């Protein structure tokens, strides 16, 4: 869903933007929103469920509690990149 005008992004437009991003090695996730023409980003769309576009993932299983913001910041500092949690449901 477009974060600006809240309209559904057609799957074809999303797929085309993903192909363009793939062609750039996912270094640029920018896209022009088909609904309102504003500059958006594949990772800033409002997806129905939490998701991320990432170069790698770190998977934690059976975590006894929530991953806190402090944990994310510290892990991001060590890895030299920002991190985001996406809760998987199987
Ligand atoms: Zn829009």
Image: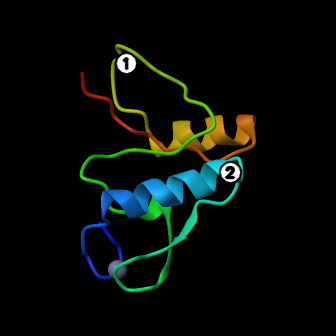
* Residue 66 % position (x, y): 35, 32
Label located before the other in sequence (2 or 1): 2
Q: How many marks?
A: 2
At label 2, counting other C-alpha atoms closer than 10 Å, the crowd grade (few under 14, some 14-19, many 20 or more) is few
Q: Residue furthest top?
A: 62
* Residue 69 % position (x, y): 48, 45
Identify which residue is drawn at 51% across, 60% down. 17
| Pointers 2 and 1 in contact (C-beta within 8 Å) | no
Identify which residue is drawn at 59% across, 60% down. 29
Quick check: 43 above or below 65?
below
Quick check: 22 above or below 1?
above
Q: Secondary structure at mark 1?
A: loop
Quarter of the image where the N terminus is located? bottom left
**Badge 1 is on which residue?**
63
Quick check: 32 above or below 13?
below
Image quadrant of residue 65?
A: top left
One can see residue 26 in this view: no
Identify which residue is drawn at 72% across, 35% down. 79
Say which of 73 and 52 sits in front. Answer: 52
């Amino acid at each position: 869903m477009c974060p600006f005008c809240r309209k559904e992004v057609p799957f074809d437009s999303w797929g085309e933007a993903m192909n363009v991003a793939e062609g750039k090695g996912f270094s640029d996730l920018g896209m022009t929103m088909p609904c309102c023409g504003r500059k958006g980003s594949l990772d800033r769309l409002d997806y129905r469920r939490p998701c991320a576009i990432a170069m790698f993932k770190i998977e934690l299983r059976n975590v006894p509690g929530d991953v806190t913001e402090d944990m994310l910041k510290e892990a991001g500092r060590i890895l030299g990149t920002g991190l985001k949690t996406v809760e998987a449901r199987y």
